[in-house]
Amino acid sequence: MKRLTLFLAVVLSFGAFGWVAVRSQESKPTVVGGLSASFAVFPSTNPSAKLISAALILTNESNENIRVCTLCMVWKSGSNGKLDVSVTPNSWKSDSPTEDQLAQHVETLYPGTSAIIPFMMETGPTIELTGNYVSGEEVARKRGFWGGSVTAKRLTYHLK
């Protein structure tokens, strides 16, 4: 996962194949327990693509290390260009990961660093993306990572 995180961080910084990710911009992110969340959308080079890559980015805004679980179920709902995304390591549709599998995906975020949780989403001329990262406090405490809910700022993406 660390290699994937590093790869996606490079893609966010430099773009893939000349494309730069569209990332939610906020002057002051909402911070909960030292953690903020934002979205990034990776434009497709194929104009007829039905799915595009996106990511929820968790950033440590504190001066302390924060451990987060990046093995998550991504719940999506919405229609007519509006998509709400809830990313959680606690709730699975089926085949929940084992404790060992979850433990392998707990990352330490040092102050100012981020973890990236990728997902795919349907595309359209305009997409309004909202959502959050939710980790139940009791489960998180038991597994040794951050617990709570942090909401990402809305991102509106216009297909060009």
Image: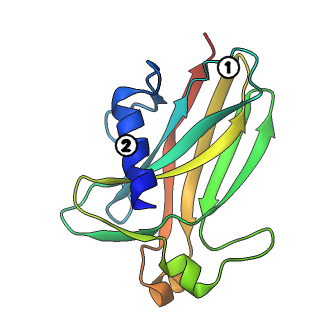
Tell me if 12 is positioned left or right of 90 in this view: left
Tell me if 49 is positioned left or right of 102 in this view: right
Locate residue 148, reporting x and y percent: 49, 69
Locate residue 72, reporting x and y percent: 60, 64
Single out the residue that lies furthest toward the bottom. Answer: 142
Q: Residue at the spot x=35%, y=52% of the render? A: 114
Disc assigned to residue 126:
1
Of badges 1 and 2, nearer the viewer stands 2
Examine the rendered structure and indicate whether residue 54 appears above or below residue 127. below
Disc assigned to residue 53:
none
- Nearer to me, 125 or 131: 125
Q: Residue at the spot x=61%, y=58% of the render? A: 87
Q: Residue at the spot x=41%, y=35% of the render? A: 11
Does residue 85 appear in the picture of this structure? yes
Examine the rendered structure and indicate whether residue 85 appears above or below residue 144. above
Examine the rendered structure and indicate whether residue 54 appears above or below residue 136. above
Secondary element type, mark 2? helix
Tell me if 100 is positioned left or right of 52 in this view: left
Colour option used: rainbow
Q: Amino acid at mark 1?
A: Thr
- Nearer to me, 102 or 130: 102
* Residue that mark 2 sits on: 9
Q: Amino acid at mark 2?
A: Ala
Count of numbered circles in the view: 2
Secondary element type, mark 1? strand
Examine the rendered structure and indicate whether residue 39 appears above or below residue 144. above
Q: Choose top left, top right, bottom left or bottom right for residue 93.
A: bottom right
Locate residue 100, reporting x and y percent: 55, 85
